[in-house]
Every structure is written in C-alpha cells, then in structure tokens.
Amino acid sequence: MRARQTISPSRLAVTLASCTAGAPAWAALPESMASPEVTVAAGLAMMLGLAGGGYLLALRRELASLRSRAREVSPRPAAVEADPPEDDRTHYFRQAEAADGIEGWSDQDGRFFHVSHAVELIAGYRCEEVLAGGLIDTLVYDRDQRYCRELVQRVMQGGMPAQCEVRVITRAGNQIWMACRLLPIRNEAERLLGLRLSMTDIQARKEAEYKLLETVAALRRAQALSEHYLRRSNEERSRLSALLDVVRMGILFMDNDRRVVYCNRAFYEIWGLPAGEAFVGVRDVVLQQRVSQLLEDPAAYLQHVAGVLQLSEPSEPVEIRFKDGRVVREFSRIVPGPEGEGTIGRIWVFEDVTEQLRVADQLMRLAERDPLTSLFNRRRFHEELERMLADGRRQGESVGLLAIDLDGFKPVNDRYGHQAGDEVLVRLATDVGAVIRRNEMFFRLGGDEFAILVPSAGAQELAELARRVGATIAGLRFSFGGESVSVSASVGIALGPRHENDSERLIGAADRAMYLAKAMGGNCWEFARDAGGAELDRTPPAG
C-alpha cells in the first residue's frame, strides 16, 4: 500500500483552480473520492477563487451530495473503502504534465475528467474543449472511435491493461498516429476507480513502417510483374513462332554479325532447304553458297545483297528469278533496338510471287485485250492515244491514227453464221499484226472496227501503212459452205495535231475520213481534213 502524502492547501487550490471549467467532470467524480478532505479542499478553493466562488460552492454541494448518497448506498469501514489520498491525484497530475505525450484520467464510467496540457501542443485543442466534447470524440479519428470505446469498456470490465494504436485528428485537420496505453487505476482496496490513458506520438515510426511496407509491396509487385512479363514473353514468343510458321512468306532474321537468328518454315520451302537442317548461328555466306545454284543469275543476286547491306533504309522489293521458272520477291530492313538504341540486326522477307504474277498478267490481258483476237481493246486504245498525244505535245511530234472498218463483213455473219465471222476476225488480226511495225499498236475496238496508233508519224508513212493493211485484208480468202469468201477494208487517216489535238476529236476526224472512203466504194483509204478546214489529202488507193 502506498504511503499517504500531505496535501498543502495552496497546491490543492492551484490544481482545482486549473479544472474549474470542468465542473461537470467534478460532479461525476466516483463516490469513492467523496471524503472530508475533498470537502475541505473545495472550501479552500472557494475562498481562493473569488471570481468563481459561486461555481465552487455548487461543486462543493454536489460533492457533499455524492458523499451522502455513497454512504447511504454502501457504507464501508474507512480502513477498507477509503479513497486514495488527494495528494496521490495531485502527484499524478504533476507527472502527467511532465510527460511527452497526452495523459488523461477517466472515472469508473469511462468519462475523462482530466487531460494534460500536452494536448494543446500536439493536437491544438485546449483541455477544456477536449473534456467538454469528450476525449475520444474530439481527438480520435472517426473510424477509430468505435474500436477505442470498445477497448475502454474491455479494460473497465476486465481490469487488465491494454494497448492500441489510433489516429488523432488535430485542430488543423491533420492525422497523427499515436500509441495508446490504457491502465486501470485502483485504490488501496483494489477497487477500480478509473482509467489512465497515455498517448505517445508514433507518427515517425508509422511513416517508416508505411515506407517499408510500400518498398516491400513495390518489390513484390516488381517481382510479380517480372514473372508475369517473363511468362507473357514466352507465350508471345510461342505465338509469334507459330504465326511465322504458317505465313506463306519466308522470314529470316540475322544479327549484326550476319549470323542467322531465326528462319521460319516457309523460308526452307522457298529456297529448297532440308526442313530438319538447323541454320541458327550460321553466317550469311554459307546460306549464299547454298542458294546461288538455284538462281538464273547468281552473280547479280550476290551483288544486290551486298548493296542492300550498305543501306540503313528499307530496301526496295526485288524479283529474283529461279532456274525452275519461279519468281521470288525479296525485301529487307534494319531491325531497331529497344527504345531506339542502335540496331539488333536485319530482317529479310521472301515471297513466291510466281502464281501472283501469272494471275496478274492474265487479269491484265482480260482487262486490256480482246478475248477473241487477243488484240488490245478499246480501253487500252484510249489510254495509249492519250499517252501518245501527251508525249507528242511535249516533244513536238505527230501521232498517226488509222480507223479501219471492214467491207462485206456483215453478209458473212448473216449468211455463214457468227463462227465464220469470228474466223475472219481472228485471221485478219493475225495477218495484219504481221505487217505492222514494232512501235505501231493494233486494236480491235468492237465488231469489225479496228484501229492502229503510230507514234512520231508522218503523212507519207501513214499512207504507206494504210496501203499495206488494205492490201493484206483484201488478200485474205476464206471458204465457208464450199464457197470462197473475201472482205476488204475502208481506212480513215488522221494526224494529230495537224487534224485535231484532242483524242476524241482526232478519233472523230479519222472516223469521218473512214466513212468517206467507204462511201467511195471501200477498199481504199482517205486522209481527214485539217483542223483549219482545208481540203482532204487525196491519194489513189493502192493496188
């Protein structure tokens, strides 16, 4: 049992005067503290506090009432139920003010009636504000209040000390982590009188813990991401390898030392290499020696490769012709390193375009040639006429146009059928095509209409060409139904820009000359009028 200390009136008065604003708290003192000493102390405080005399008088009456009720309800021997001496409480208050943290004292109901002035320095609240609003309600963060109250009740009921960590809200709205220690206070008879609350600032430790937790979490995230990216990388590599193996183009990756890093299945097929042979790590010269024997012109290809290796830009597509007739299109480009740091090698792409070129050529023929005679059709005629006229205007040269229409072709169709007519057209296309020069283009415009374009032409040259064509057509002989059949041609000649400098007008001028020749009995040719309206050039029909 602790020894009682003598309490001086002045010290007790000062202590009670510091809590005069907390009259409700004194009114809630536990009944064990209702004693003659308290009454005497209250009287002395009343005499010393002249300004608050009335308030202290009411406090004295309340304390006296508490003492009377306590005696009526639970009379006990003074030696057993005596309250702790007042000087113990004063000694505690003095220790509380000297502590670094916030100290508080509650009654048996858990209501705090004293808090140290450290609360002003730490939280910015005055003691009176904390006691009036409730220590937990005023200081503790909203989400921690329920837990704090439950812990107070548990200590009060169990009588065992407890510790916790809560967040304290300052007047400025900031949060401070504080370690709380709840210690039950008992009198000499081991009766619970209240709780002692000690709150110590642990914000620095919490921040260090948070930083440590964040560091650990960051390391775990980095490890998880590393494992995730490694797994994804392996998956992407497998998917990429599978994708490259099913594409129809041969793909070859080479590093900066010109060693093979990867080649897909199509690369083996295009170059006729054994499927089971591994080329990873092989130098490019070894591959060149293996494939050179397959090419029509190995020297030209090796020279092309040497030139490409000097480029830093993507190479233009080049068609490589093989001895077996295949055509492979090749292009390459530099592979940049990650984040633009240098290069990691070069990629070569090879595509077998043999069938593609064949189909394209066939489509071109269908689009530009007459399906019966294989001559260029009307569409190609207009394209070439526009091109030749443009070239003639730039170079100051003339373009010749021969418009040809057959004489006596309709009776052949009507009497012997379309098959006979087709035979005439096919034979005519072959024989006339044999008498025109390399730079002259022969067209079938439709039905029995034909045309010939001659670049850089002169009037005499066109007249000679018309004579040869007319003689060739007139010399054709056919036999249908046991009868001999022949046809002739009427030819109109126009010369651009002498007659017209526009394609449509030039065609019109040639057609008018051709109809004039037909009106003259056919099997002849005529020149068109000049653009200025001059008379027609007249030349007797050849033959």
Image (cartoon, rainbow, N blue to C red):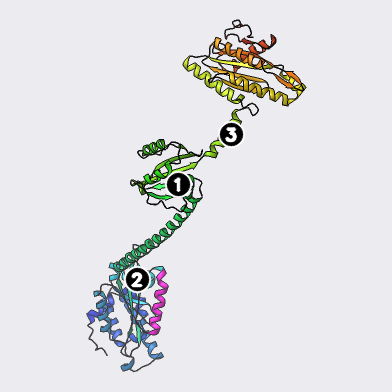
Which comes before the other along the chain, label 3 or label 2? 2
User: Vertically, is 397 above or below 201?
Assistant: above
Nearer to us: label 3 or label 2: 3
Residue drawn at (66%, 23%), measured in percent from left and top? 427
Bounds of the magenta segment: 143-160
> What residue is pinned by disc 1?
251
Percent from the top left, x then y, of residue 342? 33, 45
Percent from the top left, x then y, of residue 391? 49, 19
**How many marks can you see?**
3
Residue drawn at (42%, 53%), measured in percent from left and top? 278
User: Vertically, is 249 above or below 60?
Assistant: above
Side (left or right) of 162 relative to 372: left
Any magenta on residue 365? no
Q: CA distance from mark 3 to mark 1?
A: 29 Å
> What residue is pinned by disc 3?
362
Percent from the top left, x then y, of residue 188? 30, 89
Q: CA distance from mark 3 to mark 2?
A: 97 Å
> What residue is pinned by disc 2?
130
User: Vertically, is 417 above or below 310?
Assistant: above
